[in-house]
Structures are given as structure tokens and as C-alpha cells.
Amino acid sequence: MKKVFLIPALFCLMMLNVASMCSSDDNSSSTDPTPVINTASQGTWRVTSYVDSGNNETNDFTGYNFTFASGNVLTATNGTNTYTGSWSVTSDDSDDDNPSGDLDFNIAFGAPANFADLTDDWDIVTYSANTISLIDVSGGNGGTDTLVFTKN
């Protein structure tokens, strides 16, 4: 009789422990932009993939090195041409399924047109010391854009 009671009691105790782990309200690390900012601002980066609504446009950025500098200054240079824009990483409180915990990687270029195409508030898919993977799902036409920076 004791065994019959013990198994359900252990099961209930285990389920309560799992539920308390899943309901943690501390998600500050997933919405803190500081780690992403620190990663991006270390060294120079290159675009290793840019797909605009199914069209691979990576070659538009071949030979360019991107620097995410302090003061939100973003510079892209290939030794001949230099384009300046802005960047930031911000916490986004919108209720979407952003895998990075609602952080936006914001990029803005005014010109030329192919760099202006990068202007968006990208969702961070993943980031590491060597790779930053971004995605944007367009609200207008429903197209999906992906952008991957790899550290030089």
C-alpha cells in the first residue's frame, strides 16, 4: 500500500519542481542588450549571407568590413568606398516569438541603395563571438530577410 501512494506523491513533487523552474520571471539576461553590444563592437565583421525575400544578395557586400563602433556609428569599408550608418541593440517589449528574448539589432544606412536595404530592426536569431545571425519578417509583403555577420 505504501508503494502505491509513494509513486504518485513523488510524481507530483517532481511536477511541482519542473513547473517552478519553467515559470521563472527572471529573463533579464535575455533582454539585456549589453552582451550583444559587447560582441558586435569587438573587431570587424563581414556579411557572409544576406537573403532578401528569397533572393541571395550577399555579393553586394563582398569585400566590405563592417565596424560596430561606440556612439552607435556603423562603418562599412572596402578600402576604396566607405559608408557610414548607425547601429544599436535595443530591448523590444513587443509580444512576438523572437528567439533572442525580444532584442532588436537595429541597422540604418542612408546610401547606397544596397546598404540601405540593410536598414531594419532585425531580430537576433543567434550570436556568438564569431557570428551574428539576424532575421526580419516583413509586415507588408510577408517576406523573410536573413543577415549573417561573421567576424574577420
Image: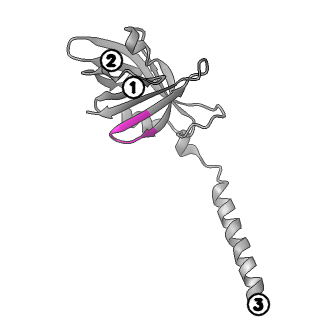
Residue at the image point whose x is 54% and y is 40% from the top: 99
Q: Most prominent secondary structure in the magenta stretch?
A: strand
Disc 1: which residue: 50
Residue 54 location, x and y as percent? Answer: 46, 24
Callout 1: SS: strand
| The label number, if any, that marks residue 60 in the structure image | 2
Task: Judge from the rendering whether residue 85 lies leftward or rightward of residue 138; answer left or right.
Answer: left
In the image, residue 50 above or below residue 129: above
| The label number, if any, that marks residue 73 in the structure image | none
- Mark 1: few/some/many CA within 10 Å (<14, 14-19, 20+): many
Mark 1 in CB contact with mark 3 (< 8 angstroms): no
Q: Is residue 41 visible?
A: no
**Amino acid bearing label 3:** Lys
In the image, residue 123 above or below residue 140: below
User: Looking at this view, is 90 or 117 the one in front?
Assistant: 117
* Position of the C terminus by quadrant: top left
In the image, residue 109 above or below residue 147: above
Residue range in magenta is: 126-133
Please report whichever mark, 1 or 3, sits nearer to the chain's N-terminal start: 3
Please report whichever mark, 2 or 1, sits nearer to the chain's N-terminal start: 1
**Amino acid bearing label 1:** Tyr
User: Looking at this view, is 118 or 143 the one in front?
Assistant: 143
Disc 3: which residue: 2
Please report whichever mark, 2 or 3, sits nearer to the chain's N-terminal start: 3
**Amino acid bearing label 2:** Asp
Q: How far is disc 1 from disc 3 in space, using C-alphas?
A: 63 Å
